[in-house]
Image: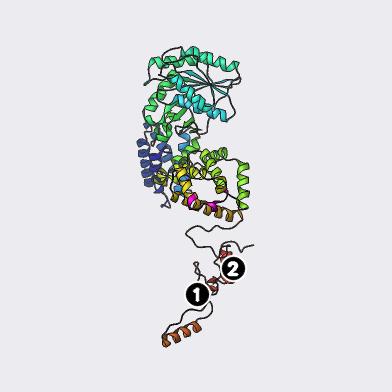
Amino acid sequence: MATFGNLSARLTDTLKNLRSKGKLSASDVDSTVREIRRALLEADVALDVVKEFTAKVRERALGDEVNQALNPAQQVVQIVNEELVAILGGEQRRLQFAKNPPTVIMLAGLQGAGKTTLAGKLAKWLRDQGHTPLLVACDLQRPNAVTQLGVVAEQAGAEIFAPEPGNGVGDPVQVAKRGVAEARSKHYDFVIIDTAGRLGVDAELMRQASDIRKATDPDEVLFVIDAMIGQDAVATAQAFQEGVDFTGVVLTKLDGDARGGAALSIRSVTGRPILFASTGEGLKDFEPFHPDRMASRILDLGDILTLIEQAQSAFDEEEARKVAEKIAKDAFTLDDFLGQMQQLRKAGSLKKMMGMLPGMGKMQSQLDNFDEREIVRTEAIIQSMTKAERENPKLLNGSRRLRIAKGSGMTVTDVNQLVQRFEQAAKMMKTVARGGVPQIPGMGPVPGMGGGRKKQQPAKGKGKRQSGNPAKRAQEAAGIAAKPAGGGQSGTGFGLGAGGAGQPSEEDLAKLQQMLGKGMR
């Protein structure tokens, strides 16, 4: 995710320079704060917010909590993290439910901010939480807005109330009132009102939004703002706050915003919390906004909690248990492998999930070059196989592989590489399931860990051919006789002496096991 990409890189580079210092001086703190100020201004954060943020960081960094810390640099990182959490809203704020259903949510914002798509994302998220939302089409100005909302509602699996065709026809205030009454009579527990926007803030836009609010008395008024508009986000938010008085903010298009100034400015300027964030074009690219997790992402500290939540929502525990049993019994097939790949796809974008790991900001270029379509290609190859071939890859001879390659639109080389990767993965998983240590490709087996070399077998047939030179034959015989048993071996890759036939002695193995913690009881 490109969210806060440039800001994250600047802040992490600035704070990294502190780690080499055992004690921080006032000049060290001032130079760090100066770099933080520049990074925030370049990220389009409002000037007043930057001044307040850097003043608090400097005051705390020069205080006793840093001077008395065992690791001053880490303490400064912690201070920056805490202050980022503070300007992002502190604690997460959840949706306010109505005491008597339905809960009415009104969406407001400029045209192009993504309100209609956001309505579908919110409806799908509510359905996943066990609710029954009704979408109400009150954007009757923008061409085909009602049609678009209908398409989005169908994709989200939600119902839509659209009595007017739109395209300039109909009264949005009356549609909003009738939509709430429809939801109440048919027992929907949420109403999402999609309102019209304008290319800019004007009196007509504010009047219409204000009239809809008075007519429906919504429990939440969510201001939808495009995170990519930078400094304009603050002025727009202030205008909507005065005209409509929204209760929360939703940031859209965060996946395309490398600066992130809007998110850091709106909360501080308006005092309204950020409730949700839209991180992509798909209906699944939508998540509740957690200030502490977002601050961790900005500082490249990772977002493990969100990663775990996404994985838990996609993976079936019962299915995972069955797969683990198959691995232990050496019964893991390409069908099982395909199932695991499909579950991985359900969890969301691999790039985004990998970006939530700590320290992945340093590997942004590798993440950008990562091709998520590789999973689709793998699925195509496996799905081009017969059931027997998936259960027993040994059946895959040359002609079968050629047929699979043609059927999946890939090459025979691609099929060969997939089969090879599957066999290596199955072997490693089986070793781990049995409590062993897998042999990593490109590395030799670890002595004493269940993967040692096989004993050398005696040479078949006659011995080594002797030299035709009598003097050389005598030298070879003398050399063999003078070589003590096991004493002239080169030893293993760990530098241990060999006990014969290239193998480590029992004493060496015992020492190695003790080093690795295996010999301790």
- The image position of residue 490, as x and y in percent, is 48, 73
Secondary structure under tag 2 reads helix
Dividing the image into 4 quarters, which one contains the N terminus?
top left
Q: Which residue lies furthest to the right in this view?
A: 521
Q: Nearer the viewer, mark 2 or mark 1?
A: 1
Residue range of the region highlighted in magenta in the rendering: 391-399
Q: Decide whether the magenta segment is chiefly helix, strand or loop.
A: helix
Q: Is residue 395 visible?
A: yes
**Type of the residue with mark 2:** Ala
Residue 236 versus residue 85 in the image, above or below: above
**Residue situated in front as seen by the camera: 438 or 361:** 438
- Please say if the residues under marks 2 and 1 sit with CB atoms less than 8 Å apart: no
**In this figure, what is the number of numbered marks?**
2
At x 45%, y 20%, the residue is 147
Secondary structure under tag 1 reads loop
Residue holding disc 1 = 489
Badge 2 crowding class, 10 Å Cα cut-off, few under 14, some 14 to 19, many 20 or more, is: some
How far is disc 2 from disc 1 in space, using C-alphas? Answer: 19 Å
**Type of the residue with mark 1:** Gln
- The image position of residue 505, as x and y in percent, is 57, 72
Badge 1 crowding class, 10 Å Cα cut-off, few under 14, some 14 to 19, many 20 or more, is: some
| 100 to the left or right of 13 | right
Residue holding disc 2 = 510
- The image position of residue 390, as x and y in percent, is 55, 47
Q: Residue furthest front?
A: 399
At x 48%, y 78%, the residue is 464
Q: Which label's residue is closer to the chain start, 2 or 1?
A: 1
**Residue situated in front as seen by the camera: 247 or 380:** 380
- The image position of residue 373, as x and y in percent, is 44, 42
